[in-house]
Image (spheres, rainbow, N blue to C red):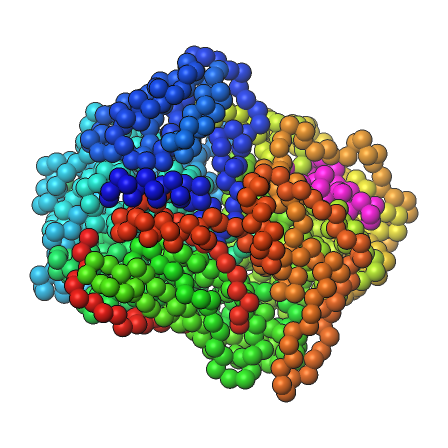
Amino acid sequence: MSKASTSISLSFVVVVLSLSLIHLRLDFSSLKSSSLFHFRKEPDCSDRTNYVVRFTHYKLAGDHRAYLESYVRLDGWQWIQRLNPAAKFPTDFGLVSIDECVKEAVINEIERLDSVRDVNVDFSHKRAPLHKRQPKVGAFVNGQKRPGKIFTSMSFSHGEEEYRIPLSNASINWGRHLMMQARFRSQITSLFGANALWGKGYTGKKVKMAIFDTGIRADHPHFRNIKERTNWTNEDTLNDNLGHGTFVAGVIAGVDAECLGFAPDTEIYAFRVFTDAQVSYTSWFLDAFNYAIATKMDVLNLSIGGPDYLDLPFVEKVWELTANNIIMVSAIGNDGPLYGTLNNPADQSDVIGVGGIDYNDNIASFSSRGMSTWEIPHGYGRVKPDVVAYGREIMGSKITTGCKSLSGTSVASPVVAGVVCLLVSVIPESQRKDILNPASMKQALVEGAAKLSGPSMYEQGAGRVNLLESFEILKSYEPRGSIFPGVLDYTDCPYTWPFCHQPLYAGAMPVIFNTTILNGMGVVGYLEGSPTWYPSSEDGNLLNIRFTYSKVIWPWTGYLALHLQIKEEGARFSGIIEGNVTVKLSSPPVQGEKIPRKSTCVLQLKIKVVPTPPRSKRILWDQFHSIKYPPGYIPRDSLDVRNDILDWHGDHLHTNFHMLFNMLRDSGYYIESLGSPFTCFDARQYGTLLLVDLEDEYFDEEIEKLRIDVINSGLGLAVFADWYNVDTMVKMRFFDDNTRSWWTPVTGGANIPALNNLLAPFGIAFGDKILNGDFYMDGEQNRYASGADIVRFPAGGYTHSFPLLDTSESGATQNVLLTNSMAKEDSPILGLINAGQGRIAVYGDSNCLDSSHMVTNCHRLLMKILDFTSGNIKDPVLFSRSGKLDKPLFLEDNQLPSRRTDVNFSTYSRVVEKDLVCGTDSRFEVWGTKGYNIHVSGRNKILPGYPVFDIGGRSNSTSHDSRPIEKKGDSDANGFFSRMYRDEVDVPIVWSQWLAPAVIALIGRSFSALELLKDYTETSTTEKGICYREPTRRSLVRKI
């Protein structure tokens, strides 16, 4: 890479890279170490914290040090010299130690420098010491944070004895964790037919395999080709003293007959990035990643992960690795069977994410599930994992000699990494860089995989890895593009769940299907024109599709999201709509070629459509007002779960509320998701608006519209709240030894002050009690887990009170013993009332609907509530005379729960100091507007032969216009661009619209993570993944 091209490209791209995530719109200003936390430990100049300073150019570390020492005038900081194998190569970051008492001033001065990109805390990734039969241990014990970075508990055997920290589905991982569970013994290579390739002479020869783990011993008898061992930790050893790294290496390249690896002649490069205490730092990873790039690794295995996809130094370095043609394989995590629990970096589209199965082809219970949650709540996640492999009871190497059996996705990951090494060796060495790259290898794996019967695509991806099928694909591979998944078939259930579980119909919110574009032609590519929908018959014209997608594909991958909506004239249509969406890709010519490489990709659609259901059967789920971790400390909903303090599973109908979704569908309801404000839906279409576990604020326009929707339009409203108590939130804060900061919850389990504002027009409010206990209703036992009480309710309504324990004053998270002497008092927790033409039901706890920490479900109660809110059917138990209020419940305003004044809530909110706008998950006619009756939309074009039915597309909301709200934090340039593109205001304006082509033209064929754009988002109003390469003139084999 030339210095000139590096300088030019970095200067153009540094501003935009962090905005270019996959189908994602996030404000990364919240990632500063100071932005998550609002309590600070008193400054102590004896305290020092390490920070990663990222530069805009690659230079030797000494040059970066000299630069900082020349321009940073303040004292209180010092350069940390990193003595590791990467020190002889240019680097793009430095490590500095800063005194706590001058931290903010020094960081601000460093970040103002022209050659400095940003400053981030050097996060620690820590594992717990292993103790035999130790009880379940995660990042938090009894509500107290353990030292080091947040991690999920993990387990694996050590030597002959089993040392285990059991996996908890309720545990959170902010760090990178080693994902294994000790089990029994099985051979693995024969199940994939590796011996067939060995018989052809393919054994992984001349393939450089980087294993990022706990190291390996130089004289280990199971390995014939340990090329290099490097240590990136602060311990003076290269050996593996834990057994994790050795086991992973054995699965990939072991030669012992009892525990054979897939590619015995693979060249092993062992990167020791974890200490014996299972601790690592971001800076260690960054140095090791840079070294892997400099030494031209072919494949890299990461049996690590966490949900910290906003750890930008780490995430962007992964982009750089894959951009330099290193094929990364990573475990998706051991946080199953919950949905929405994918770990990073396996959730990145340029990484091969691997899940685990057992020998019966069942998804392993420990294996994390998709979808990806980067895009939630204001988009829709991608399909992950990419593939699955056997991950239970797999044999691998012990630390010194012999074999053992382990289970976990960090076993499945090296299984796939070994398969990849074997496949790489199939291609002649002189042609490998022409054919093999992260995209082409993923294409070979997903297209060759065997789809399993039973699991959905968010559990299995493309299916079980099939080594021999992928071998056949690679033998005749020509560089091309493709789409994954390549088919959306509503008749293929349960594989295409949740799509196959609810058909489309006219008048519904758009259904979003988010696919990944794989570009095997080059690290960078472009979409030529807009994606196009080609229906197979006239009926297909009833399907209206809009697209959001990556205009620039980098590195190797992008996204294509389909927004599917049935036109109004299809309100009575019933049948199947089939057709194809085509996308044209191009990539710059490589060396020896004169014209761009081109490929046309086809996404096959087979959509089931039914007549528009009656209003009483339609439910609208509010996704817009949900806030999850990251980037803020959003606390758990149940305070009974002390080892899982963060709310990180997405809070989506298709993640941790998927059981609720299935139950409602099985009961005959149709449930749609609203990712935009309340002004963006037509209340006449829905029986009930369902609000569950919501953390955000509400626009004034939303509050007024909801009042009118309920009273005048007959909308039902069902609210499931959660705890909120400021004293408890303050007690839940903890001091993080890595960031030297106090972490405090942004809100409670739900944002009760905001909900009270929303419900104020109806005379309803929740209090700040935190109620716990079991109660019986209609003969059914229910668990109330950290729920709120009702403190305001109108006369004439019905409330239900039960004897529950108020734990708010006892300090639920402070290890206070709860004694039998603590009295239980009757507290109202359920209320129902008619309000004008509509009906309202409120309940103070949502844990009974959330599969994350559910003790007992309240589905039966919910069904009775929906009978009332949607159909005015009154259950005799819920509406018994004893529950009717003769006089209202009332609590003075000054006694209601109040907002925290010490939290800058706008950092996390989509409402506070933001514009009210309907996004790309709302009806097409209000995209980019403030909503119904504020924007006058035209009717869809009438198709010949189809009658038009008014399904309520006109306004039912208040007629006054929304007041303009200045959106703080936007640069003048962004404001200017948003005015230029007023028809695309929901789409982030990315500088790459003009810069990317210029950058790529200037830098030629050398790419780094800071030199190219990850993403470009554009919408199209035009209306499978089988792809084919268009002919090009190719005179020479591509060379790198």
Which residue is depicted at the point 41% across and 65% down? 528
- Left or right of residue 391: residue 150: right
The quadrant holding residue 479 is bottom left
On whether residue 752 falls in the magenta region, the answer is yes
Query: Horizontal and vertical percent for residue 466?
Result: 26, 64
Magenta highlight range: 748-772
User: Which sits in the foreground, 729 or 289?
Assistant: 289
Q: Work out which residue is located at the far bottom of the displayed protein and give it.
A: 945
- Where residue 59 appears, as percent x and y from the top left, is 27, 32
The residue positioned 71% from the left and 51% from the top of the image is 719
Of the pair 377 and 991, the residue shown nearer to us: 991
Percent coordinates x, y for residue 565 in the rendering = 59, 69
Left or right position of 227 against 191: left
Residue 66: x %, y % from top left: 30, 22
920 shown above or below 758: below
Query: Going by the image, does 475 lie left or right of 289?
Result: left
Tell me the residue at 48%/15% (across/down).
Answer: 101
- Vertical comparison of 212 with 465: above or below: above
On the picture, is 708 further left or further right than 142?
right
Q: Is residue 344 above or below residue 97?
A: below
Q: Quadrant of residue 49?
A: top left
Q: Residue at x 32, y 36 (%)?
A: 57
Q: Is residue 875 visible?
A: no
Res 979 seen here: yes
Is 666 in the magenta? no
- Residue 764, located in which quarter of the rendered image? top right
Instruction: State the residue in front, 679 or 723.
Output: 679
